[in-house]
């Protein structure tokens, strides 16, 4: 079953509760929260306080994506705020196994993310430590970017790694995901789709989310 995780990065924060409710009623499976620190990526978004606030607005699982330096210093804060999945970047974690093990100890689902230019070889040593692998299909930092088509090859490769591992690991994609790119990434092996501007940036949030779900190719559609 393919899951849709709308990213609140593109939501209207003055109407956040209402927009989350619309997405939830339209069939969103998770909510994706992009945390940026202005150092690891050239943008600043929000911290644990926002995660805690969103937790009070929805029953959907919160998929928290840490695009920050020194993630070890903040993992507990985000878990305490209500993060259900915590994803850290390979590029930001000096001792990646230690970081992933700490997330596990805190009781959250463990995610690891790769930027577009990062080799997949980094994944081979940590497959037993993760519940989710996030392949970035844009360079992180801003919403509304164009999907990098070469990442389809990377998605396929990671999907094969997961299959060979024999483990039940989500393969998430983030960046430029809409009703046009969805069939391509799902056919390549992705089963969690993060979409921000295509959903929350649309005039009709429910319609936009429904169109993405409808574009999931059979037999993957739930």
Image: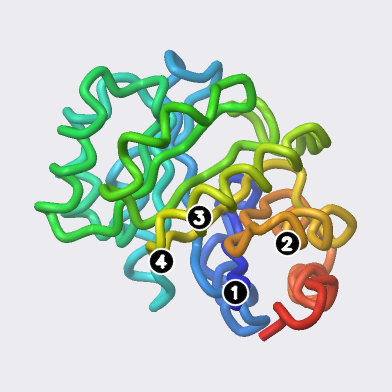
Vertical arrangement, residue 209 with respect to residue 35, above or below: below
CA separation, marks 4 and 3?
Answer: 20 Å
Q: Quadrant of the N terminus?
A: bottom right
Q: Who's the residue at 79% across and 59% down the image? A: 182
Q: Using the image, determine if residue 180 lies above or below residue 112.
A: below
Q: Tag 4: Cα neighbours inside 10 Å, few (<14), some, or many (≥20)?
A: few
Residue under numbered circle 2: 186
Question: Label 2, label 3: how many angstroms apart (C-alpha)?
Answer: 18 Å
**Measured Cα–Cα span from mark 2 to mark 4:** 16 Å
* Distance from the alpha carbon under mark 1 to that under mark 2: 16 Å
Left or right position of 32 against 71: right
Of the two numbered discs 1 and 4 in the rendering, the one whose residue sits closer to the viewer: 4
Q: Which mark is residue 28?
A: 1
- What residue is pinned by disc 3? 32
Q: Nearer the viewer, residue 140 or 43?
A: 140
Q: Is residue 35 above or below residue 68?
A: below
Give the quadrant of the C terminus.
Answer: bottom right
> Could you say which quadrant of the image residue 219 lies in?
bottom right
**Mark 2, secondary structure of its residue:** helix
């Amino acid at each position: 079953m393919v899951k849709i995780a709308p990213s609140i990065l593109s939501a209207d924060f003055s109407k956040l509760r209402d927009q989350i409710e619309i997405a939830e009623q339209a069939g969103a499976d998770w909510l994706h929260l992009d945390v940026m620190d202005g150092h690891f990526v050239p943008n600043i978004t929000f911290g644990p306080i926002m995660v805690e606030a969103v937790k009070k607005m929805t029953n959907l699982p919160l998929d928290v994506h840490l695009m920050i330096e020194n993630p070890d210093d903040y993992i507990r804060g985000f878990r305490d705020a209500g993060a259900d999945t915590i994803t850290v970047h390979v590029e930001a974690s000096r001792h990646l196994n230690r970081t992933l093990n700490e997330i596990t100890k805190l009781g959250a689902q463990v995610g690891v993310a790769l930027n577009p230019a990062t080799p997949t070889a980094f994944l081979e040593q940590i497959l037993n430590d993760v519940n989710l692998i996030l392949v970035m299909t844009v360079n992180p930092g801003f919403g509304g970017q164009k999907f990098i088509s070469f990442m389809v090859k990377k998605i396929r490769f990671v999907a094969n790694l997961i299959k060979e591992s024999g483990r039940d690991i989500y393969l998430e994609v983030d960046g430029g995901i809409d009703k046009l790119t969805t069939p391509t990434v799902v056919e390549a092996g992705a089963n969690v789709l993060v979409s921000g501007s295509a959903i929350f940036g649309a005039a009709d949030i429910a319609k936009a989310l429904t169109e993405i779900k409808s574009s999931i190719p059979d037999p993957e559609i739930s």
